[in-house]
């Protein structure tokens, strides 16, 4: 799959990282315009977001202003240089957005989780050239995310970006949604040129974590950020605790450090090259050691089979964890890392030995 880079989505050059800011929901013409006029003072912000149809968890809460709010966004376009972005969940939404000159549409997390809806949206997009942002599904299921991207791509859309907004936490956590950065990283590994945007507002759920999450996303080379901003966050009809005043959003954006991925400084490039050589050599030794360890594991497997001894030995396993954690800690490795690494190695060892037990002959 070949995706169009964000900076060529429109006739005019668009800033990268792309900053998309605006309220969770469009609530009134005044709120929409006041927020937009404040945000457009920062030239780094190119796109204005606002939810028109809100997918709320429970009925009876504010569900968006619907079609009439699209005319408020047209007014934003008249009065500012901002492009506008709206969430869609059905062909009807797509049609209304196209008719009212919306520049970018996005598919929300709840919709991405439903292939029927994504397919219907994809069908309604055939022959239309509009950028589509695709949020990750609520559950940490990479295939669902990829599936939605494929459906939109198959409709002929090439201006696509994935939006990482975190995953539903089953336990209570300080963040509203768990980032699970490994999932967007895996997505980028599979689709190298797929533009990636992070939505730190929905990951955070409260204002205090937005900056940290935003910086982390930029450090991971995300192509843009979607940040919720409301002229009067305390009075917001949805997501009040995570929206920033326009001025605070602008200040936050200006504190963020954008690092470059290319290495222009020659000294630094040489140094990095030497460090990378070291890493390559250490990795190769690690692989050799793991292979040696696995050979021993197989030998033990044969011995266990011969003596009718179980593969899994809880005391031995506890001892391994205990001693390695202690040893690892002494040499500056985190307990969590050691535990995860050992678990992975142990799982593989058990599997190898179980295979040996299954075999008829040794
Ligand atoms: C939103 O962007 O306001 C929204 C509803 O987000 P999500 O789909 O990520 O929950
Ligand atoms: Mn929101």
Image (tube, rainbow, N blue to C red):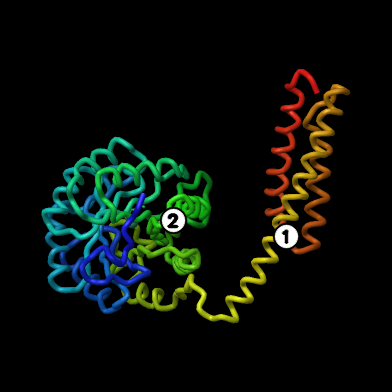
Task: Indicate left or right for 189 with 310 as reference.
Answer: left
- Which residue is depicted at the point 54% across and 81% down? 265
Which of these two is toward me, 31 or 282?
A: 282
Image quarter for residue 343? top right
- Which residue is depicted at the point 23% across and 65% down? 10
Task: Indicate left or right for 213 with 133 as reference.
Answer: right
- The local secondary structure at tag 1 comes to helix
Classed neighbour count for the residue bearing mark 1: other residues with Cα under 10 Å, few (<14), some (14–19), many (≥20) = few
Q: Is residue 34 above or below residue 311?
A: below
Q: Is residue 102 above or below residue 121?
A: below
Quote the CA–CA distance across marks 2 and 1: 26 Å
Task: Indicate left or right for 143 with 105 as reference.
Answer: right
Which of these two is toward me, 252 or 83?
A: 83
State the quadrant of the C terminus: top right
- The local secondary structure at tag 2 comes to loop
Q: Is residue 307 above or below residue 170?
A: above
Image quarter for residue 277? bottom right
Which of these two is toward me, 278 or 54?
A: 278
Image quarter for residue 45? bottom left
Label disc, if present, on residue 178 of the rendered structure = none
Image spot of residue 62 (x, y percent): 25, 51
Residue where numbered disc 2 is placed: 192
Image spot of residue 276 (x, y percent): 64, 66
- Which residue is depicted at the point 17% across and 51% down? 66
- Which residue is depicted at the point 48% across and 72% down? 262
Image spot of residue 195 (x, y percent): 38, 59
Label disc, if present, on residue 282 of the rendered structure = 1
Classed neighbour count for the residue bearing mark 2: other residues with Cα under 10 Å, few (<14), some (14–19), many (≥20) = few
């Amino acid at each position: 799959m070949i995706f169009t880079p964000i900076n060529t989505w429109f006739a005019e050059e668009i800033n990268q990282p792309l900053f998309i800011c605006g309220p969770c929901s469009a609530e009134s013409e005044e709120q929409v315009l006041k927020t937009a006029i404040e945000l457009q003072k920062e030239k780094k912000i190119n796109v204005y977001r606002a939810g028109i149809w809100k997918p709320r968890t429970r009925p009876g809460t504010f569900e968006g202003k619907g079609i009439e709010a699209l005319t408020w966004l047209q007014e934003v376009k008249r009065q500012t240089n901002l492009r506008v972005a709206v969430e869609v969940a059905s062909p009807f939404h797509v049609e209304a957005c196209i008719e009212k000159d919306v520049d970018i549409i996005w598919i929300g997390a709840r919709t991405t989780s439903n292939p029927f809806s994504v397919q219907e949206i994809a069908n309604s997009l055939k022959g239309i050239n509009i950028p589509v942002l695709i949020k990750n599904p609520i559950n940490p299921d990479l295939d669902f995310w990829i599936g939605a991207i494929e459906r939109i791509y198959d409709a002929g859309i090439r201006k696509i970006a994935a939006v990482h907004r975190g995953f539903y936490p089953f336990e209570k956590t300080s963040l509203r949604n768990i980032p699970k950065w490994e999932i967007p990283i895996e997505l980028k590994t599979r689709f190298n040129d797929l533009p990636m945007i992070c939505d730190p507002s929905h990951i955070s759920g409260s204002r205090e974590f937005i900056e940290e999450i935003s910086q982390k996303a930029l450090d991971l080379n995300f192509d843009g950020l979607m940040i919720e901003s409301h002229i009067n966050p305390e009075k917001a009809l949805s997501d009040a605790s995570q929206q920033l005043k326009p001025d605070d959003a602008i200040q936050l954006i200006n504190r963020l450090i954008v690092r470059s991925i290319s290495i222009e400084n020659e000294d630094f490039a040489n140094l990095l090259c030497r460090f990378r050589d070291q890493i390559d050599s250490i990795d190769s030794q690690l692989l050799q050691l793991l292979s040696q360890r696995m050979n021993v594991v197989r030998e033990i497997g044969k011995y266990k089979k011969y003596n009718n001894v179980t593969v899994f030995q809880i005391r031995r396993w506890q001892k391994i964890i205990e001693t390695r954690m202690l040893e690892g800690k002494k040499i500056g490795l985190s307990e969590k890392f050691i535990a995860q690494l050992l678990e992975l190695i142990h799982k593989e060892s058990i599997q190898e030995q179980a295979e040996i037990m299954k075999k008829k002959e040794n």
